[in-house]
Image (cartoon, helix red, strand yellow):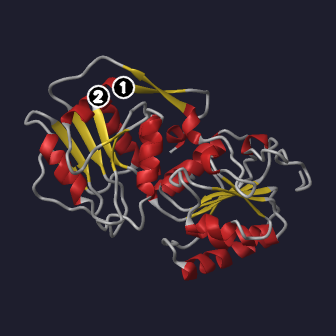
């Protein structure tokens, strides 16, 4: 296979038009970005010789078992120096192997690796994360000016000539109503594993609406607390978290893309606690954009952290999410 194959239609440039058995360089950070890219990859028939470029973490180790990969050092948000060092780590791979395509969903690691891939003559595509419902991220804004890098959005509402739209992962699911739920609940509260950003507002809001008979599991990350009922966990592997979620009547999750997609894959309609930059819970307010998008689609609901209501939990517990297509499940592989 050669890079001269017409990989995408010139009008839509949809990733669904990638020819079978293309050798792809998949570039991504961890967390929601890896989840998104893995789900995109599961809809394509790429070559088993494809290579994943990401960070060495428990999440990536589980997913990449049996897949070719090339680990680079961690690149934090807006850490240009680390992003440059990651590109240097990828450069020998690009000299050593031929790739038909390079695809990324971000984040900062893409800002330097993708221009390098494009410079090597590889057709290169950056798919903006679902977290960006109103416009591109800083990485996207940088890459839209990078020679040879084609940028795509999953949101037609802000698509343009520079940002053609590609089918959204969110089109994979629909919701259906179930039996009304009342009384005692089994609840999972998961705040992700983001370091440096506590989320006490979410915990405090949940304490206001939990009933005395509710069975609660908390996955708190760095939001350490000693005043909580139920089981309190810092971090757990994805398979264990999935098992807890499957037993739960309702899942309350921070509005990170990876957390939300994981619950949708399990058939859960999560209640979202949205991190705010104003309260020092994230670097910006992209979680608010994503939460509104998924709630508008009926896939999630949003917990009002200032005036939380138990009815939101009961309503979410009665909904079921089902697949709208036959896409391969990422979580089955993870």
Image location (x, y in percent) of residue 191? 32, 53
Q: Which residue is mark 1?
A: 319
Image location (x, y in percent) of residue 294? 46, 40
Drawn side of residue 188 relative to residue 139, left or right: left
Disc sitting over residue 31 in the figure:
none
Q: Which residue is at the far left?
A: 212
Residue drawn at 67 percent across, 79 percent down: 88
Q: Which residue is at the far top?
A: 179
Distance from label 2 to label 1 (Cα)? 7 Å
Image location (x, y in percent) of residue 176? 43, 22
Drawn side of residue 93 relative to residue 4, left or right: left
Against 19, residue 324 (above or below) is above
Q: Which of the two residues, 85 or 139, is positioned nearer the viewer here?
A: 139
Drawn side of residue 249 relative to residue 300, left or right: left
Density class for disc 2 (Cα within 10 Å; few <14, some 14-19, many ≥20) is some
Q: Which residue is mark 2?
A: 315
Q: Can see residue 261?
A: no
* Residue 39 location, quadrant: top right
Residue drawn at 11 percent across, 36 percent down: 211
Q: Are marks 2 and 1 in contact (CB under 8 Å)?
A: yes
Residue drawn at 67 percent across, 50 percent down: 159
């Amino acid at each position: 296979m050669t890079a001269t194959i017409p990989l995408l239609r010139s009008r839509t440039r949809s990733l669904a038009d990638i020819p079978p058995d293309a050798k792809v360089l998949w570039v991504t950070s961890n967390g929601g970005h890896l989840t998104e890219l893995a789900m995109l990859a599961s809809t394509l028939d790429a070559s088993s010789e494809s290579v994943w470029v990401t960070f060495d973490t428990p999440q990536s180790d589980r997913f990449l078992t049996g897949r070719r990969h090339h680990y680079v050092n961690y690149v934090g948000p807006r850490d240009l120096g680390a992003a440059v060092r990651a590109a240097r780590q990828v450069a020998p791979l690009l000299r050593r192997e031929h790739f038909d395509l390079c695809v990324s969903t971000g984040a900062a690691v893409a800002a330097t690796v993708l221009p390098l891939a494009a410079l090597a003559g590889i057709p290169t595509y950056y798919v903006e994360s679902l977290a960006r419902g109103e416009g591109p991220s800083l990485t996207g804004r940088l890459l839209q000016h990078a020679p040879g890098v084609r940028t795509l959005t999953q949101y037609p509402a802000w698509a343009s000539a520079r940002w053609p739209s590609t089918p959204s992962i969110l089109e994979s699911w629909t919701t259906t109503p179930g039996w009304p739920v009342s009384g005692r609940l089994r609840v999972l509260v998961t705040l992700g594993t983001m370091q440096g950003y506590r989320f006490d507002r979410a915990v405090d809001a949940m304490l206001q609406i939990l009933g005395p008979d509710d069975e609660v599991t908390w996955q708190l990350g760095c939001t350490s607390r000693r005043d909580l009922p139920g089981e309190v966990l810092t971090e757990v592997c994805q398979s264990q978290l999935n098992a807890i979620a499957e037993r739960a009547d309702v899942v309350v999750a921070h509005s990170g893309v990876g957390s939300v997609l994981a619950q949708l894959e399990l058939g859960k309609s999560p209640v979202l606690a949205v991190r705010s930059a104003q309260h020092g819970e994230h670097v910006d307010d992209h979680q608010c954009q994503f939460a509104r998008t998924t709630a508008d689609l009926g896939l999630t609901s949003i917990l009002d952290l200032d005036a939380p209501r138990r009815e939101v939990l009961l309503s979410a517990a009665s909904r079921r999410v089902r697949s709208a297509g036959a896409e391969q499940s990422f979580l089955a592989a993870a």
